[in-house]
Amino acid sequence: MRKDAEFDIIVYGATGFTGRLVAEHLLKRYGVGKDVKWAMAGRSPDKLAAVRDEIGAPAETPLVVADADDAASLKAMVERAKAVITTVGPYQLYGSDLVAACAAAGTDYLDLCGEPVWMRHMIDAHHETAKKSGARIVFSCGFDSIPFELGVFFLEEAAKARFGHTLPRVKGRVRKMKGGFSGGTAASLKATMAALAKDPSLIALMTDPFALTPGFKGPEQPKGDKVEQDPDLGAAVGPFVMAAINTRNVHRSNLLTGHAYGRDLVYDEMVVVDPNAPPAPALGAEGGPKPGEGPSKEERESGFFDLAFIGLGEGGERLTVAVTGDKDPGYGCTSKMIGESAVCLITEATDTPGGVWTPGAAMGMKLVERLRANAGMTFEVEA
């Protein structure tokens, strides 16, 4: 992290739908230039000024012009900040130069990425550079994958307190959820599918549960690709579209913490389903939100999620924790999660060294407590 930067945080992509929500959260929670010095960044100064006025930010709110197609402007931007939040995706199309700039400059980087192949390429390319510069590169700071990655972390911490050891089998289950995925998430999936079609050799990496743990392969993991009855939940469960990124991040967290959950961790994610109901529309199907679009404020306010994490031990140990959010997952909760992650990283997790991180491995219980206090999330032991 840069210690002498002009700004604590720059929100890059602030004129986009999700970026605007991040700016709104920082304004509501921290004001401008008081507890946290933050700025809004994007391609168009006129659009930045319009969004600043629309969200009710004061006229002196700093505006920074930067463009993903202009590497010099990205370099100039990151050198002004301790941390850059970027909501400009798909990251495999628009994020590589920004990661490189942050890693070189020692500036912290946070995104909402759910693109495991690109993330692996960034790990291979920039982890060592970031370690040397002190930059903390933190992917997946939204609904993918904070509630899931921190859910496993919270469960394993509770297991150590109760049983004296971690639990090698963990099930992540989406019990209830209202609100959809963002248009950016759908666009990222389409970009990933296009990349796989162009280079089929990437499919092996995409389907590898340990794609983000270079040098380590754990035990075989459940596929989670069909509807089944889960005896530990007492409900039918089916495939969960975000499992392909969340499970990879959980295994990376385990690696980064020296296999704190054990080298034999088996983790899967599924969603509670009605086996008699018609299948839900595929992510990215026609009629869904496009990048820059999203639900109304009323729809965001009425959304929520309720996740269960069930830990099982070889000696019959069992523990369940719940993680909930009070807004729709893809926008209302996500914007608060990434905003609070950035504040946590630069104020409370300053001892975390440089490198490519997951939020939980970088910030752990500090981030859990901040999300409880400022982001409408709960982490609780149920049974």
Image (cartoon, rainbow, N blue to C red):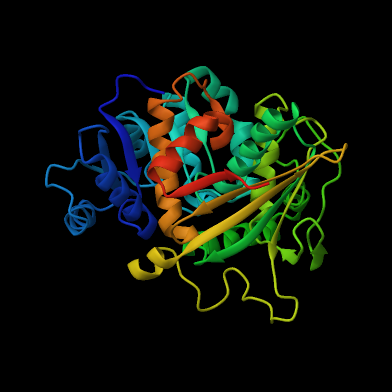
In the rendered image, residue 197, in percent from the top left (x then y), is placed at 69, 61
Residue furthest to the left in view is 59
In the rendered image, residue 154, in percent from the top left (x then y), is placed at 61, 38
Image-based side of 147 in relation to 247, left or right: left
Residue 296 visible in the picture: no
Location of residue 209 by image quarter? top right
Image-based side of 221 in relation to 211, left or right: right
In the rendered image, residue 378, in percent from the top left (x then y), is placed at 50, 47
Q: Is residue 307 above or below residue 218?
A: below
Name the residue at 59% across, 37% down.
122
Name the residue at 74% across, 58% down.
233
Q: How many marks?
A: 0
Name the residue at 52% across, 25% down.
130
Location of residue 236 by image quarter? bottom right
Q: Nearer the viewer, residue 326 or 286?
A: 326
Q: Is residue 38 above or below residue 209?
A: above
Q: Nearer the viewer, residue 76 or 50?
A: 50
Quadrant that contains the N terminus: top left
In the rendered image, residue 47, in percent from the top left (x then y), is placed at 23, 57
Name the residue at 67% across, 29% down.
161
Location of residue 239 by image quarter? bottom right
Residue 55 visible in the picture: yes
